[in-house]
Image (cartoon, rainbow, N blue to C red):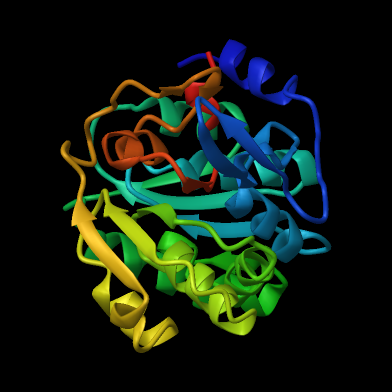
Amino acid sequence: MTSSLLAHAQAFPDFTPTITPIEEHDGILVKREDAWARGGASGAKARALFTVASGSQGIVSAGARISPQLERAALVAHALGIPARLHTGWGKVTPETSVAVSAGAELFRHRPGRLSVIRARYRADAERYEPLGWACVPFGMEHPTYLQQVSEQASRLPWVRRIIVPVGSGMTLAAILRGLNASANPSPVLGVRVGGDPTRTLNWYAPGWEDRATLVDAQDSFDTAVGNMLGDLRLDPHYEAKTLPFLQEGDLLWAVGIRASALT
């Protein structure tokens, strides 16, 4: 991935509504959190990163080599004119790591590349830099700002037959459930698991989640990019696109965001 992709991402028009829209695509309602965009970074997680990092001295974050959190954190830092220190695993270059480096981030590749190692290296860096005024955002966006912003968006959803959510770390699903409970919205939720086991996160941030949500496994592994078009809407090929086999008439798809490296 080259700097031309970075230029393409940065040319993506800014759109920062207070409440992201709900649109219909191919007969399915879509909560367009992915439509929020600034500085080439899109989606709810970019919104939270901008909120947390505004006025800070830099960003410390972490993600797997194919995690969009790497490129989002780098693009946000680039837009704000601050440095970024990003932790990931050892291995071959990916589109996500290329965008991050092209945006000027300092990328630390750890061996072995297990998530436990990446998280430990991130925590050590955060302990050093947070007292210096840096914004520190953990792997999986496990941050109170993200939880609050997504919960607020979810509290404004209409009642629908079913809400479909891609589930990685579990933070998005936990926040949605909080928002639904706050607004007494009884809509059931189907979470399509695209990564590891999210139950630790769900138990901590949304206790009793089993009463509101059902988890099913995606048909393809996290590493696999799949066909990502819902009518004329392009979805993230590793996340939202894996909900496509489960969507039915009357459902509402929660679109978290699309990575910059999937925009071409």
Q: Is residue 228 above or below residue 129?
A: above
- Mark yes or no: residue 258 visible: no
Instruction: Provide residue 173's location: percent of width, then percent of height.
Output: 43, 65
Name which residue lies at 40% across and 67% down: 188
Q: Left or right: where does residue 168 sit relative to residue 261?
A: left
Picture quadrant where residue 182 is located: bottom right
Picture quadrant where residue 114 is located: bottom left
Q: Left or right: where does residue 200 sit relative to residue 67?
A: left
Name which residue lies at 75% across and 35% down: 39
- Mark yes or no: residue 136 visible: yes
Name which residue lies at 35% across and 40% down: 247
Camera-side residue of 245 and 104: 245
Name which residue lies at 57% across and 26% down: 102
Camera-side residue of 132 and 198: 198
Quarter placement of the N terminus: top left
Instruction: Provide residue 185's location: percent of width, then percent of height.
Output: 57, 74
Camera-side residue of 250 and 5: 250
Picture quadrant where residue 123 is located: bottom left
Instruction: Provide residue 50's location: percent of width, then percent of height.
Output: 73, 54
Q: Is residue 67 above or below residue 154?
A: above
Instruction: Provide residue 69's location: percent of width, then percent of height.
Output: 49, 48
